[in-house]
Image (spheres, rainbow, N blue to C red):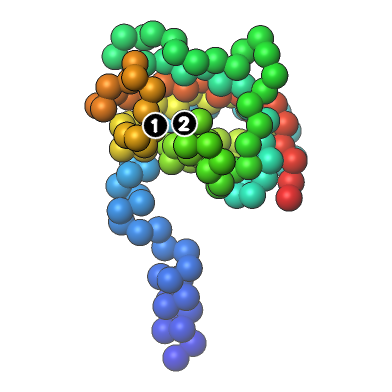
Amino acid sequence: MVLATLYLYYVVEYKPSQKRVKLLEDLAMKVVHKPSECELKASDGDLVHVHYTSFLKSAGQQFESTKGGEPYVFKLGKCGQQSKPECMKGFQSAVMGMCTGEKRKATIPPKLGYDKKVRPPEISFDEKILFHIEMVDIDKD
C-alpha cells in the first residue's frame, strides 16, 4: 500500500509529462562557462538578471542584445510582457538552474519560441533562435 501511494505521488508530482519531455528534447543547450563555485541556482520565482544576445539561427543575424547596457531583469516562471524572451518556454528552460556567472548557448525551436501573436516581424514562423545567455545575478524570493 505504501509503495502504491509513493508511486502515485511520483507520477502526479514529479514525473514529467511526455509532452513536456518531447518539447524540451528539441531545446539544444550548451554550457559555455561554468563558475568554479555555484552557491545559488536560478529557480522558479527568482528575480534573475541576465545579459543575452539573440540571433536568427538560419542567417546568423543578430536581432536583439542587452550587452553594453543594463541586464535584462525578470521573474523566472512568470510572463510579464508577451514580446519579451521571458515569455518563451525555451528561454525560461535555458535560464532555469543557471548559476551566477554562468554562460549558456541555447537554440530555441519555434514551438518553444515567441508566441505567433507577438513574434517580431523579422522572425519567420519556422525560425530557430540562438541565445547567448549570461547570468549576472539571482535574487531569491
**Does 32 sit above or below residue 15?**
above
Q: For this view, does 111 lie left or right of residue 74? A: left
Element under disc 1: loop
Q: Residue at x 50, y 15 (%)?
A: 64
Give the residue pinned by disc 2. 83
Which numbered tag is attached to residue 118? 1
Q: For this view, does 66 lie left or right of residue 111? A: right
- Asked if the residue at tag 2 contacts the one at tag 1, i.e. Cβ–Cβ closer than 8 Å, the answer is yes
Which numbered tag is attached to residue 20? none
Query: Exactly how many numbered labels are in the figure?
Result: 2
Q: Nearer the viewer, residue 81 or 4?
A: 81
How many residues crowd around disc 1 within 10 Å: few (fewer than 14), some, or many (20 or more)?
few
Element under disc 2: loop
Q: Amino acid at mark 2?
A: Ser
Q: Position of residue 102 (x, y in %)?
A: 63, 27
Q: Position of residue 78 (x, y in %)?
A: 56, 46
Residue at the front extreme? 117
Q: Nearer the viewer, residue 55 or 30?
A: 55
**Does 84 sit above or below residue 41?**
above
Quadrant in the picture for the N terminus: bottom left
Q: Amino acid at mark 1?
A: Val
Residue 23, picture quadrant: top left
How many residues crowd around disc 2 within 10 Å: few (fewer than 14), some, or many (20 or more)?
some
CA distance separating discs 1 and 2: 5 Å
Q: Residue at x 42, y 63 (%)?
A: 15
Q: Residue at x 68, y 13 (%)?
A: 69
Q: Residue at x 34, y 16 (%)?
A: 122
Q: Position of residue 11 (x, y in %)?
A: 41, 70
Q: Is residue 4 visible?
A: yes
